[in-house]
Amino acid sequence: MNKTIILLIALLLFSCSNKPYEITTVNGVKTIRNFKNDTVKEIKLSSEISNDSLSYAASFDFDRDGNLYILDRGNNNIVKFNSEGKYIKSFIKTGNGPGEVESIGFFSIANDRIVVIDRLKKRYLYYSLDGDFINSIESENFVAFSKLNSQGLLGLSYKIEKKDKRYLDISLIYDRKGFDSKSIFSTGMKVLDKNYVEFDNTPIFDLSDDIIAVYERSRDRFKVEVFDNKGERIYNFSNNFTKKKLSKKDIKSLKKRYPHFNLSSEYIFSGYGIVIDDLNRVWALMKFGDKFSLSCYKDGIFLFKTSLFDIKDFSMFDITEKLKVWNNKIYLADSNSGKVLVYDLE
């Protein structure tokens, strides 16, 4: 009898340990704990999108038909390609007149509109998908790093509440009806002295018309919070993460590239970026030595991770702008070459 009980307990423990994930719900918010992350899909470089006029591919986005729009920071304009990668047109002029932009910070697409952030004039400019100027908006809630979805504009801003403490705040700056700002995620950011701040805890976010995903940078755990398009939390998910040390080469390189951030920790981050694709899957960017991999999650459940690939001009600040997944293809802007690299999932 005792042997039977022991065997049943052993079988139960074995089955639990082999569960791919576990879901619990508290106050309507789901928590998904993933235990497996070993399924790998190979990717291969299939094509490159470029044009003679394209000098510095800083970021890009897609419209609902799969047309590709690239922010060329070298020429301060936007270059449009069709879904096959064929050049269509370039638009936006530099200047202070109607429809002109002094310096494009970021841009995004939703509801068949393009919003461009003029970071010097602190305003939002709207264009049709053909590049025709519609209107511009100035707001007291202006945030330089902003993205548009069907509900409104989402931005990441800094708030200083104490001398030694800053807060990074992700807010719905305004919805389609007005300028009512609503904070959906906030995290502390310690100031070490007047020049240095911690790099830990800084959030990275992406959004689609349906969801908003936020990853809070951490060296101890991997966790993503997901909200609906009105900023209400709907679920969060995590996965196993083992702390790993940075190489001396990595530490030296990071300190050189980010001199105003605290890089004293010898451990890598659990994630380096997240993007949401056209199927509302969340893709998390992980680093393995000098290479990278993307882990794919649907409704918080791990599906697979890609084989390793290179990112030559990697930056933790703008990787979400340079990386997209669309129609089961991975697009990566290579700013140095002025190209967008296209990888197929096999």
Image (spheres, rainbow, N blue to C red):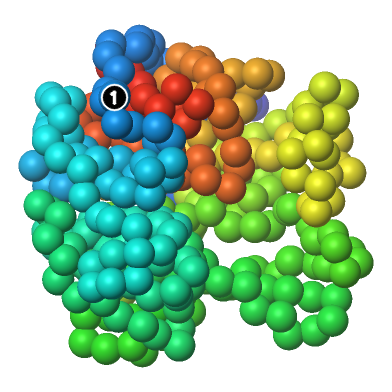
Q: Could you say where residue 282 lies in the image, as x and y percent from the top left?
A: 37, 43
- Along the line of sight, which residue is nearer the eye, 14 or 265? 265
Which amino acid type is marked by label 1? Answer: Asp
Residue at horizontal 61%, vertical 27%?
A: 287
Q: Vertical placement of 343 versus 294: above or below?
A: above
Residue at horizontal 16%, vertical 66%?
A: 133
Image quarter of residue 84: top left
Image quarter of residue 209: bottom left
The reply to whether residue 223 is visible in this rendering is no
Q: Could you say where residue 119 lies in the image, as x and y percent from the top left?
A: 47, 66
Q: Could you say where residue 284 lies in the image, as x and y percent from the top left?
A: 48, 38
Q: Where is the C terminus found, in terms of image quarters?
A: top left
Q: Is mark 1 on a helix, strand or loop?
A: loop
- For label 1, the crowd category at 10 Å Cα-Cα, with few meaning under 14, some 14 to 19 and many 20 or more, is few
The reply to whether residue 32 is visible in this rendering is yes
Image quarter of residue 275: top left
Q: Vertical placement of 280 versus 268: above or below?
A: below
Q: Could you say where residue 291 lies in the image, as x and y percent from the top left?
A: 59, 18
Q: Vertical placement of 201 versus 98: above or below?
A: above
Q: Mark 1 points at which residue?
A: 52
Left-right relation of 264 to 293: right
Residue at horizontal 50%, vertical 40%?
A: 319
Left-right relation of 290 to 184: right
Q: Vertical placement of 127 versus 231: above or below?
A: above
Residue at horizontal 43%, vertical 35%?
A: 56
